[in-house]
Image (cartoon, rainbow, N blue to C red):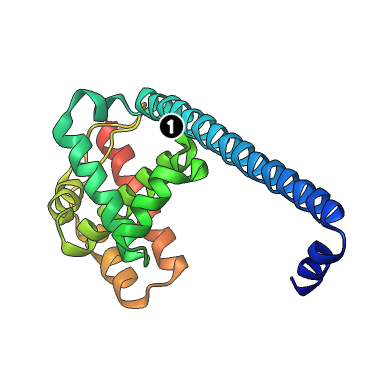
Amino acid sequence: MEELQAMQAQDPQKHAVILGETAQIDAQFARAVQEFAARQQQVQVATQQYHEHFCKQQDLMFAAANTELVSDSAKHKQATEDALTYLRENGLADGQITWLWHTQPWFRAAGTQQALYDASQFRKIKKSIADGRLRANEQKLRTMPPVQRPGASGQVVSDDDSSLKQFNARFTESGSVRDAARLVAERRHLNRKRRA
């Protein structure tokens, strides 16, 4: 600054030229900053439009793969809550989830949505098994009659036969493979007798 003041006193013309050039540089810099801000805003708008289009496209792909969620709003709401619970249990805060959902294309991708849905459903099934909600179904399966194979006779060998009881008792005591084979052989023998 002192040099400019000294120059103004010694050579006012040169001082005026330097001030004019400095003003031009300042104006060019201001225009460049404005152009940069305008371009940055254009890029942000274009990025936002692309993100919105991408998200809509991915949401439609996920919906096409999971039509039961589209047709039933209660299921959709429950699936959303299950996914949020799953993410929270894995350490994500609500703010992080919201930020990821609205800003990160990879998080909004149909594949990620499907993986989240599947993981939350698996967690829900696993939890319901642990809670014992499926035990009733397991008991139903246990009480179902044995499968009748093609070509097998419909007659079941009764345990009334004393020889069969003997083989059964021997196998129960020993648990050996040899006694198991004898028990099976005796059952087959009794079945052949009854068919004849």
Whether residue 72 appears in this view of the structure is yes
Q: Amino acid at mark 1?
A: Cys
Q: How many marks do you count on the picture?
A: 1
Residue designated by label 1: 55
Query: Where is residue 43 shown, x and y percent of the image?
Result: 57, 34
What secondary structure is found at the residue carrying circle 1? Answer: helix
Residue 152 vertical position relative to residue 186 in the rendered view, above or below? above
* Quarter of image, res 24: top right
Q: Quadrant of the C terminus?
A: top left
Q: Please name whichever residue, 86 or 32, is drawn nearer the observer in this view of the structure.
A: 32
Name which residue lies at 45% across and 25% down. Answer: 57
Tell me: 8 left or right of 134: right
Sort mark 1 into few (<14), some (14-19) or many (20+) by Cα contacts within 10 Å.
many
Query: Where is residue 58 shown, x and y percent of the image?
Result: 45, 29
Tell me: 26 left or right of 43: right
* Quarter of image, res 6: bottom right
Name which residue lies at 74% across and 70% down. Answer: 1
Query: Where is residue 80 shown, x and y percent of the image?
Result: 25, 44
Residue 130 vertical position relative to residue 22 in the rendered view, above or below? below
Q: Please name whichever residue, 61 or 43, is drawn nearer the observer in this view of the structure.
A: 43
